[in-house]
Amino acid sequence: MKKDYRVKKNEEFQHIFKKGHSFANRQLVIYSLKKDGQDHFRVGLSVGKKIGNAVTRNRIKRYLRQAFIELEPYIKNDYDYVIIARNQTKNMSFSEIKSSLTHLLKKTNQFDHKS
């Protein structure tokens, strides 16, 4: 995922948490905030230490990034997202994480069916 597509700064995370809308399922929590005039969406990932060691957390983040890359044509461009992984994600495969993310994006109406 390109660096332009990432939310990196703590202030940006906090702004999305405060102003954005959240939706959740058993595996993931998503916060979304509309940002007008943006050419592409941006994503911030959060995987806490309670989920596992560094190897496990990095695998989950890799899976989430890859899922966003594959779903990119269907995701609305003028939003910032923060994804928080829950404990159930540590035992999930890539396809399970991708379907969980797709479910949440559809639930938040951020999934564009036209493409």
Image: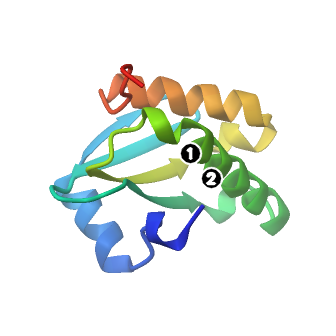
* 10 sits to left or right of 49: left
- Tell which residue pokes out farthest to the front in this image: 115
Q: Tell me the residue at 62%/53% (across/down).
A: 65
Residue type, mark 2 in image: Arg
* 12 sits to left or right of 25: left
Question: Label 1 near label 2: C-beta < 8 Å?
Answer: yes
Task: Identify which residue, 86 or 77, lies in the foreground.
Answer: 77
- Tell which residue pokes out farthest to the top in this image: 113
Please provide percent x and percent y for residue 108.
Answer: 31, 30
* 109 sits to left or right of 18: right
Q: Dot 1, how many residues are within 10 Å of its Cα: few (below 14), some (14-19), or many (20+)?
A: many
Residue type, mark 1 in image: Phe
Please provide percent x and percent y for residue 3.
Answer: 52, 72
* Image height of 97 relative to 14, above or below: above
Residue 26 seen in render:
no
Q: Dot 2, how many residues are within 10 Å of its Cα: few (below 14), some (14-19), or many (20+)?
A: some
Please provide percent x and percent y for residue 37.
Answer: 17, 59
Task: Identify which residue, 29 or 97, lies in the foreground.
Answer: 97
Q: Which residue is mark 2?
A: 65
Q: Which residue is mark 1?
A: 68
| Secondary structure state at the residue bearing disc 2 | helix
| Image quadrant in which the N terminus is located | bottom right
Please provide percent x and percent y for residue 114.
Answer: 36, 20
Tell me the quarter of the picture where residue 80 sits: bottom left
* 23 sits to left or right of 5: left
Q: Tell me the residue at 78%/55% (across/down).
A: 59
| Image quadrant in which the C terminus is located | top left
Q: Tell me the residue at 49%/23% (across/down).
A: 103
